[in-house]
Amino acid sequence: MVTIDATCSLESFRKFVILSTCNSFVPESYLEDYEVFPERETSPGLIYVEAADKVTLKKIRDMIFVNAKEVLGIIYSSKSGNTNLKWRQIRRTTGKVTGEASTNTLVNLTEAGVITQEWVQNYLRKKAEENQVSPMN
């Protein structure tokens, strides 16, 4: 598990949720609309969008697509239960992502722009340093 603590845009986190859950079947018009977010009611795998104004658009498979304005936060957990992340608004469309992610999730977080390649490389370098066994004197 990887501890995530990063600042990103709401759009980057929205892209991450779509990439991780419904990229293969999300309607093109929803993909292009930055106010449309996927939600899922099942647990593990819960995805919830907290917003000042939210309207349900359509249910496709196990995903419910909502139109959300003034998003305050998003709770995301993977179906496997290995990833649990929260995006919390800091200012307008900028927020902070915190939680635990599986190493597989790092790919989608990077692709969506939530974290950078540099962030992943720094994390891997720190882990390698932690795992090195120091010689006993």
Image: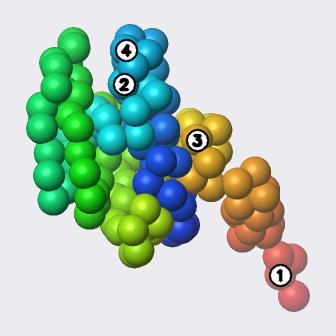
- Image coords of residue 123 (percent x, y): 70, 62
**First along the sequence among labels 3 and 1:** 3
**With 66 as the anchor, is 12 left or right in this view?**
right
Q: Quadrant of the C terminus?
A: bottom right
Residue tagged 4: 27
Identify residue type, mark 4. Pro
| Residue 104 - label | none
What's the distance in space between the residues labelled 3 and 2, CA to CA? Answer: 16 Å
Residue tagged 3: 112
**First along the sequence among labels 4 and 1:** 4
Callout 4 secondary element? loop
Mark 3 or 4: the one toward you: 4
Kindly tell me whether residue 97 is visible in this rendering: no
- Image coords of residue 74 (percent x, y): 29, 53
Foreground pick, 12 / 79: 12
- Image coords of residue 63 (percent x, y): 22, 24
**First along the sequence among labels 1 and 2:** 2
- Please report the residue visible at 41 percent of the width from the left and 40 percent of the height from the top: 34
Callout 1 secondary element? loop
Query: Is the C-beta separation of discs 4 and 1 under 8 Å?
Result: no
Residue tagged 1: 136
Mark 1 or 2: the one toward you: 2
Mark 4 or 1: the one toward you: 4
Foreground pick, 75 / 59: 59
